Amino acid sequence: MAGLEKAVALLRGAERIIILCHSFPDGDTLGAGSALCRAMRGLGKRAAVRCSDKVGPKYKYLFEGLGDDSFSPDLVVSVDVADPSLFGEPVYSQYGRKIGLSIDHHKSGTPFAEETLNNPEAAATCEVIFSLVKALGVKTDRLMANDIYTGITTDTGCFQYVNTTPKTHRIAAELMECGADTTEIDRAMFDTKSRARLELERRVLGSMRFEREGQVALIRITKQMIRESEAIEDDLDGIATIPRSIKGVKVGITLRERDDGAYKVSLRARPPADASKICEKFGGGGHKGAAGCTLNMPAEKAEREIVEETERYLDEYL
């Protein structure tokens, strides 16, 4: 486990850095990746961000002014990746066995990097990046502040989730002082939906089922739903929070069909339930309020397996 000083030494000692985000990217992995890329370039190094999935219009602003670069790295860094299965292809095939540093905030997962900088008390990986950028001595300009703020606001549900701490608010205040466009970012992340997103929500809500007297809610997102609604990846961002938002629900489950037929499972839990404890049973991980795993099985079996494990967990711990 690398401390902050070791991570700084690794980054300062490298000249060509590739930064990896997880597949189905969210605001935290992309914000952390773009912010670290800016910091490395600010130190005069070559740096670029890689992701198995294309970055959609919603998050394009995070890469303003960065462009792209192609080179052979002497250091590969992952951001906000708790398990190597989350990289997706082709990133894992090219870089998955060469990762020198993992920067993360999830309390559970599978170690895969030579060194890991992880702070499970942080609300988002972007909180860790904020501390790292300071330790590197790089000035946080407006664009970098936007990157880091995006990761924090999306991973805290605009500061509503239980992972939000006093430190989270203090960092957000500093980012505002650095010029972060907080109002515009929050509006884009939480108050703006495309028509395709609404069409997708309509179909997803039709799949909803409840278990354990309404304490567990489950929705399914199929490839057909995505196709019929003409949704893009950006339109799926945040859908996993829908089941948890229902009164009386302790654990919300979202199953998303992948191209290979497997199902990506996203769990969202209300205190005192711990989503990571459930996902660990399937080789996944995360943190208390949000966790994930992958089930390589047909839809009906996947639903049954995850619901039964969730009910076992609730029976035993709550």
Image (cartoon, grey):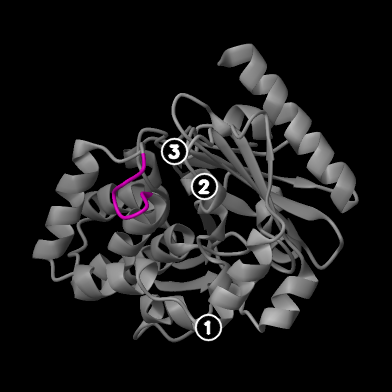
The CA distance from mark 1 to mark 2 is 37 Å
Q: Residue flagged by tag 3: what amino acid is it?
A: Asn
| Residue range highlighted in magenta | 156-161
Residue 257, quarter of picture: bottom right
Identify which residue is drawn at 55% across, 16% down: 318
Residue occupied by mark 2: 102
Mark 1 falls on what kind of element?
Answer: helix
Q: Which mark is residue 248?
A: none
Identify which residue is drawn at 78% across, 71% down: 223
N-terminal of the pair, mark 3 or mark 2, is: 2
Residue occupied by mark 3: 118
Q: Residue flagged by tag 1: what amino acid is it?
A: Arg
Mark 2 falls on what kind of element?
Answer: strand
The CA distance from mark 3 to mark 2 is 8 Å
Q: Position of residue 43 (x, y in %)?
A: 29, 68
Q: Nearer the viewer, mark 3 or mark 1?
A: 1
